[in-house]
Image (spheres, rainbow, N blue to C red):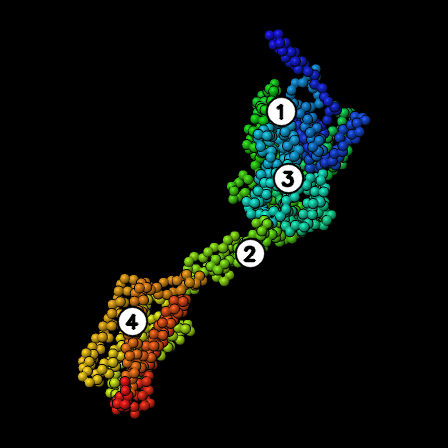
Amino acid sequence: MLFFLYTLLLFHHCNAKAENTLCRMMGDPKYPLFSKYGDLTIGAVFPVHTKETLPSFEFRQKPQSLSCSSVNLRDFRLAQTMIFTIEEINRNAFLLPNVSLGYRIYDSCSSRLSSMSAIMSVMNGLEFAAEHKCNGQTPVHAIIGETESSATVILARTTGPFKIPLISHSSACECLSNRKDYPSFFRTISSDYYQGRALALLVKHLGWTWVGAVNSDNDYGNNGMDIFLNAAEKEGICIEYSVKFYRTEPEKLTKVVKSMKQGTAKVIIAFVSLIEMGLLIEQLRLQNITGLQMIGVFGWIASKTLINSKTSSVMGGSLGFALRKIYIEGLPDYLNTSFWDTAFPCSQRDNNLSEYEINCSSYQDILVVRNYTADVPEQRYLSNVYKAVYAVAYALHSLLECKRQEGCDKGLTVQPQQMVEALKKVNFTVKFGDRVWFDNTGGAVAQYEVVNWQQDSDGLIQFKAVGYYDASLPHDQRFVLNTENIIWAGGQLQKPRSVCSESCPPGTRKAGQKGRPVCCYDCIPCADGEMSNETDSNNCMQCPGEFWSNAEKNKCVLKAVEFLSFTEVMGIVLVFFSLSGVGITVLVTVLFYSKKDTPIVKANNSELSFLLLFSLTLCFLCSLTFIGRPTEWSCMLRHTAFGITFVLCISCVLGKTIVVLMAFKATLPGSNVMKWFGPLQQRLSVLAFTLIQVLICVLWLTISPPFPYKNMKYYKEKIILECSLGSTVGFWAVLGYIGLLAVLCFILAFLARMLPDNFNEAKFITFSMLIFSAVWITFIPSYVSSPGKFSVAVEIFAILASSFGLLFCIFVPKCYIILFKPEQNTKQHLMGKTQTKSY
């Protein structure tokens, strides 16, 4: 119990002591560069100087304050613009009517150390409340700054725990869009998320697929380059190298320049801060590296400080995204005249010290730029500072419940968190027409100009607008670029090429090179039957079934159709032999008819001879049905006509063979066989043999007839028009039946070859059957192995060869006797031999 009472008393004592704690400043205060008292105060941190000199740290005496030098003209203009805007608001009778705004503007000297010192001074102020007690209130209601993203990250992390709103005019790093880490951060510039994607869109639009990438090794450069690299990968853009450096790392800068010099990419994406860009340009100039197309960001692309007579050869033709150039009425006059007469701390030279004992000697380097006015028209960040100050004013106007006639309630206390919430709701339009509001990440809408470094007639570099990017517009209208108005690197009028490999023409495809980016490839011709009709095609497309690629492989054309035609040489030769066979057969028929009463014609059934000649004529003619484009009718006719005519032919030969045998038997004593195979029986036998073949053909045509067929399997590049057999059984049945009759005829003729006769016809029939059999035996393997129209030619050759064999072997010897040996064409001569020959 006593311990509990002791603890309670100790807690009460500590609490009472904390309430009466006196504020004590450690070290010397850091005074603002520019300041003015007001009812409400806006703080700011700008890198007005670019060089910081550290004091000696020998620990023998108290270290001196950091000294800054080398005026950064761009950020000095930003500080001037902030003062101009605050004075304009103070003159406004409708915005914060009875409240005056003050300002405290600190210089961070482009240094992280000075930046931390500046932000702590902004947050704490220089004086304390009455009796030096800590009241826990910051003297500023919002802070404007910083210029660079890395410095702004430091500011945002420092002010974040205290909920003090921080509004940046140029910190575009996407990392600052994280509301969890930076809940009180706002900016009147868009995130680099849009600029990185816009850069990829620009590169793709200009047809560049092979680029180098350089960025500042800080939050701004690293995050911005990551966004660009991801967007570039999606757009099919390849990065030859991605290098980075920081302003205090000369050895890395040397490596960056070496990469640019040795690289093959002609386009360089420079996601670089202004200071680093100045160092990079100087090194490129010293090493005389020219002809590179620089693509820049708004951090440096429209900065006049980078332009001089020595850099135009290196940077001429540079292209990139800049903030829109906006004219603010009254601002140029103020920057050039009014500021120096009213707001500049040393403008009144009456030897009176200010309340902070500012030494005017520290402003001597700033006074040097007093008469420099050439940069004012190109300052593109000024409008962002103007908007930021007005956003704070409108937020305060809302929190103080200001009314036009009654004014603002000065008795209200504005807490930092209230300012954050009020800024989220601001929505107004400034006098030059821009609407100001913050999205859910605290950023503004992306609106850029595409500017091009062009040399005018006086030899001076000017920033020419050649397009724009506006993220507020529909997707297909966001980006516009007038390429005809662009002057490229080196003053060229023709756009430079920057590719790892030249474009693959139609008819080829891209094949990636092992171990290299996808933009590095070889052009491989499409395979046969494939095509590509686009430039840089990744794959070749297979042509449809009836199509084939042309010689250039850039389109599919109908496959060549192959069939045995009447107009080609082979067809003409076969037609010639077919018609020759018909002509010879007709001549033999005429000769036999004119000598029909002679013994040699009458010796072996002239009726069968004429029927055989007729069938041979049909055999020669049926070969013509195999020539020409196959049709449904020609396919059915060619095989059936061939089968029936050949059976008719072989039947006649078989009949003649039987007649020879029967005639010999009839001469033997007591034989009466001729009555069993007289003219009627001969006709019936020929008819019966032929009808069997006709029946086979009818069944074939009924069940599965031949039909025209496009054969695309044998040749890939052409279509073979052929007659499909339909039923292979039917085809081989027709051939088999012909072969059966031929074998039977050959056997009978072979048996009758030595019969006693001065003109033994059985010998010639035997020879004809030998030729017939040889032709058709060799036909089968030749037919099966011959491709396309050659198989048809083989079949026609077999028909013609066997027909000529029958014609020549059976009829030529008789024609020879009739024409050249008429003395042997007598009955006595034909019968004389039988009296002396034995058998």
Q: Earlier in the sequence, mark 3 or mark 4?
A: 3
Which residue carries the number 1 mark?
A: 162
Camera-nearest residue between 294 and 37 = 294
**Residue density around tag 1, few if under 14, some if 14–19, many if 20 or more, within 10 Å:** some
Residues at marks 2 and 3, CA–CA distance in whole angstroms? 36 Å
Mark 2, mark 3: which one is toward the viewer?
A: 2
Mark 3, mark 4: which one is toward the viewer?
A: 4
Residue type for callout 1: Phe
Residues at marks 1 and 3, CA–CA distance in whole angstroms? 28 Å
Q: Residue at x 59, y 42 (%)?
A: 228
| Label 1–label 3 contact, CB within 8 A | no
Residue 743 place in picture, x, y as percent:
30, 74
Q: Earlier in the sequence, mark 2 or mark 1?
A: 1
Q: Earlier in the sequence, mark 1 or mark 3?
A: 1
The label number, if any, that marks residue 740 in the structure image: 4
Residue 324 place in picture, x, y as percent:
61, 40
Q: Secondary structure at mark 1?
A: helix
Residues at marks 4 and 1, CA–CA distance in whole angstroms? 113 Å
Residues at marks 2 and 1, CA–CA distance in whole angstroms? 61 Å
Q: Earlier in the sequence, mark 2 or mark 3?
A: 3
Residue sticking out furthest to the bottom: 823
Residue type for callout 3: Gly
Q: Secondary structure at mark 2?
A: strand
**Residue density around tag 2, few if under 14, some if 14–19, many if 20 or more, within 10 Å:** many
| Label 3–label 4 contact, CB within 8 A | no
Residue 643 place in picture, x, y as percent:
30, 70
Residue sticking out furthest to the top: 2
